Image: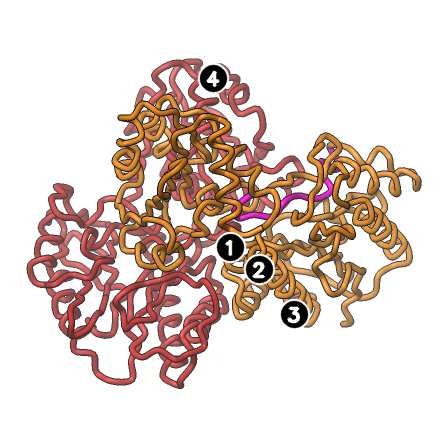
């Protein structure tokens, strides 16, 4: 799928929903869990609040703040009319005026996640607009050719980042120091951002943002390394020990790898996402960890990857999204086990006609960092 | 100045009791109660993008998901942390608040808390930053007409304490080291992003909590965030740097060049005059007007806003903009910037100024304005 084909699919859906125009809004707070309809419709990652007005059969306009960022936006989006603005809502009101005067039906995407001082005003500008998130994000469930290439590059950077972690992580270093160094290192490789969760301890209750905890010999180090390359995230989930790992930890980690492989095997076109989760759970249940396959221990076995669309959504038992070629998402049976604490194990995959293709060169394996 | 917001905050944010003791936070809350005597408590929202007010009252920086502080006038404050119960251990070292709970069922939680603490009239802080759905849930749960008192708190935040000023000086020292590292890299022929990254690494190694950068590939005409590696060397290289140390931001512009830059020198002259004018009691609008008259033609980046107060947020109020009637306050710390752009060249320079009862003190300035 190309970007233009995706835009055509969205316009076709707008016709089906009898929408005259569609407004996408985003407040500039880029987050892995929050889809960004402006990015989907424009490919532009904004500094500040931004909006797109997509006419069903006419032009598309990108409103960008701060106004001085307009040239970067125009270079990124040659097919869009780019409007420089100091206030996104004022500019949106002007951009929507012709559509409103025609009395056509408007749709809006992104409102729920937008900060109140912007969202509240937007609802006054387009008071009758109906929710159109599904129109935008359904069309973006499969990645474009360009997004897939970017996901591959982000994965390459993530693997190099992990190699750097293994090289430098040592007792006496704080989690914060290690996280800063890794984020910086992945930036030197071309990642413009990194959703980097990293923590260490003898028995981690979860993976969490780093803090000042000073790592000790024997700690289990868990890391979700998630670089973004040109706005496309990819993630690897890894576990390493500072010093030798005990035999039980090795056995349990191998169990997680088997569970992950079962999930990857189950992810193929036509399969519902829930079946991927079920395949992972089945491996763990067979080893007596059935109760750990559900909340509060675990709520999902993977997720979509933004910053644009986060479809196909969570790898969870209640997600019946049917997998199609071109979808990119995480499969990670990240699991708290009573004997080991929380362990991370996961790969980004691309759904192809032949099944799920891990984007990584090396799949997850427990690493013992020599001291 | 706005730079790209990261998806997750990475960097040291633990509460440092020696540098910012609990008594400092207690005094801040006490001052707030005096300013809003009818409030039975405050509900303070913060997320990874906007959390200066939350940090001011709790020291907590939400690195991942949003947080909500429930601070009663009488009683024990609570901090509700997004992400579930498993996130609490990692959050504990970031605040002096001892009662931490997962942030869930927000409407029900705040309604019950409000009833338990005097029933009637808690106020909101930071409600503008709440996501639309989150705000609706809180508004529906609380009595109609619940008031937002962010502006009142910001007035208190504007006057920095001695401890805050000490931290801001450290942030400015980190900014200085960052710019120096960028200058050294650029001077030795490093590519544009390599030079910027050299500065970012210098900041990290000084223990910076965060660093944000913008740079120019066209001689300072436009600014951009890091999007991809740019291997070619750029001279002059206009940079914008914001460094956060122990919660507090310092920001600055610099023109990195291997030859004299007349445009930057002219901007430096204008900036020096603006700094001299930044005295207690001066109207912000007058400072902006002085810059606009002397610094012509203005750079698009600085044309609308010539500065702002700075501290726990990169951009605090008041803004140094035309027509602003707010006055420069003693105890305030301000960032001032001057940008020029015409056919002869482009440059933006800046300074950070602490304003005292008598006179002011330049905490940092672009070398062109020193």
Q: Residue at x 19, y 55 (%)?
A: B306
Q: Which residue is mark 2?
A: A150
- Is there CB contact under 8 Å for labels 3 and 1? no
Q: CA distance from mark 4 to mark 1?
A: 37 Å
- The chain ID associated with circle 1 is A
Q: Are marks 2 and 4 in contact (CB under 8 Å)?
A: no
Compare residues B270 and B353 and report the one nearer the observer: B270
Dominant SS type (magenta): loop
Q: Earlier in the sequence, mark 2 or mark 1?
A: 2
Q: Which residues are magenta?
A: A296-310
The residue identified by callout 4 is B141
Closer to the eye: label 2 or 4: 2
* Chain to which mark 4 belongs: B
Q: What SS does tag 1 mark?
A: loop
Q: Provide residue B146's location: percent of width, then percent of height.
A: 36, 19
Spatial distance from mark 3 to mark 4, Cα to Cα?
A: 48 Å
Question: Which chain is tinted red?
Answer: B
Q: Secondary structure at mark 4?
A: helix
Q: Is residue A31 magenta?
A: no
Magenta span includes A307: yes
């Amino acid at each position: 799928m190309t970007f233009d084909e995706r835009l055509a699919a969205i316009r076709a859906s707008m016709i089906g929903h009898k929408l005259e125009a569609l407004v996408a809004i985003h407040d500039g707070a880029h987050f892995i869990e929050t889809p960004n309809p402006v990015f989907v419709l424009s490919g532009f990652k904004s500094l500040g609040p931004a909006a797109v007005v997509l006419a069903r059969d006419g032009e598309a306009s990108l409103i960008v703040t701060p106004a001085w960022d307009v040239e970067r936006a125009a270079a990124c989006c040659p097919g869009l009319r780019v409007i420089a603005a100091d206030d996104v809502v004022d500019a949106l009101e002007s951009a929507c005026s012709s559509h409103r005067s025609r009395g056509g039906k408007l749709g809006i995407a992104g409102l729920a996640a937008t900060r109140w001082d912007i969202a509240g005003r937007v609802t006054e500008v387009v008071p009758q607009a109906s929710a159109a998130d599904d129109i935008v994000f359904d069309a973006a469930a499969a990645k474009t050719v360009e997004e897939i290439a970017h996901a591959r590059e982000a994965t390459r950077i993530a693997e190099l980042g992990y190699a750097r972690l293994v090289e430098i992580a040592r007792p006496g270093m704080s989690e914060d120091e290690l996280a800063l160094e890794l984020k910086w290192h992945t930036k030197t490789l071309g990642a413009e951002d990194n959703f980097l969760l990293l923590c260490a301890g003898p028995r981690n209750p979860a993976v969490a943002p780093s803090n000042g905890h000073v790592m000790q010999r024997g700690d289990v180090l868990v890391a979700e390394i998630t670089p973004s390359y040109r706005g496309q995230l990819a993630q690897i989930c890894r576990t390493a020990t500072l010093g030798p790992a005990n035999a039980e930890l090795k056995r349990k980690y191998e169990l997680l790898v088997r569970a992950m492989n079962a999930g990857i095997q189950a992810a193929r076109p036509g399969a519902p996402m829930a079946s991927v989760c079920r395949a992972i759970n089945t491996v763990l249940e067979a080893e007596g960890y059935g109760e750990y396959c559900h909340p509060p221990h675990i709520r999902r076995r993977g997720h979509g990857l933004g910053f644009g669309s986060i479809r196909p959504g969570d790898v969870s038992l209640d997600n019946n999204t049917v997998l199609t070629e071109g979808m990119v998402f995480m499969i990670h049976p990240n699991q708290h086990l009573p004997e080991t604490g929380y362990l991370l194990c996961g790969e980004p995959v691309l759904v192809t006609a032949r099944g799920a293709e891990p984007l990584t060169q090396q799949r997850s394996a427990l690493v013992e960092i020599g001291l | 100045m706005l730079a790209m917001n990261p998806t997750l905050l990475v960097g040291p944010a633990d509460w440092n009791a020696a540098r910012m003791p609990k008594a400092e936070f207690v005094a801040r809350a006490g001052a707030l109660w005096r300013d809003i005597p009818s409030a039975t408590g405050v509900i303070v929202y913060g997320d990874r993008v906007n959390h200066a007010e939350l940090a001011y009252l709790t020291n907590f920086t939400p690195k991942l998901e949003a947080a909500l502080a429930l601070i009663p006038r009488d009683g024990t404050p609570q901090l509700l942390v997004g992400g579930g119960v498993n996130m609490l251990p990692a959050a504990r070292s970031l605040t002096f608040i001892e009662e931490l709970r997962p942030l869930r069922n927000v409407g029900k939680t705040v309604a019950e808390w409000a009833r338990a603490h005097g029933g009637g009239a808690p106020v909101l802080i930071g409600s503008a930053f709440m996501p639309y759905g989150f705000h609706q849930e809180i508004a529906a749960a609380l009595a109609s007409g619940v008031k937002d008192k962010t502006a009142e708190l910001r007035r208190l935040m504007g006057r920095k304490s001695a401890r805050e000023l000490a931290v801001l000086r450290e942030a400015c020292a980190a900014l200085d080291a960052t710019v120096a590292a960028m200058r050294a890299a650029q001077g030795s022929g490093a590519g544009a992003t390599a030079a910027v990254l050299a500065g970012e690494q210098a900041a990290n190694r000084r223990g910076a909590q965060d660093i944000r950068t913008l740079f120019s590939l066209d001689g300072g005409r436009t600014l951009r965030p890091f999007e991809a590696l740019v291997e070619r060397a750029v001279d002059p290289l206009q940079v914008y740097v914001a460094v956060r140390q122990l919660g507090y931001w310092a920001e600055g512009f610099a023109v990195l060049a291997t030859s004299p830059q007349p445009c930057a020198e002219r901007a430096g002259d204008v900036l020096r005059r603006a700094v001299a004018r930044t005295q207690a009691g001066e109207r912000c609008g007058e400072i902006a007007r002085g810059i606009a008259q002397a610094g012509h033609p203005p750079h698009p980046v600085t044309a609308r806003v010539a500065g702002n107060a700075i501290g726990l947020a990169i951009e605090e109020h008041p803004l140094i903009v035309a027509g602003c009637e707010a006055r420069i306050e003693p105890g305030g710390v301000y960032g001032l910037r001057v940008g020029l752009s015409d056919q002869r060249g482009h440059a933006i320079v800046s300074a950070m100024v602490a304003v005292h009862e008598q006179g002011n003190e330049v905490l940092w300035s672009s070398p062109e304005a020193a």
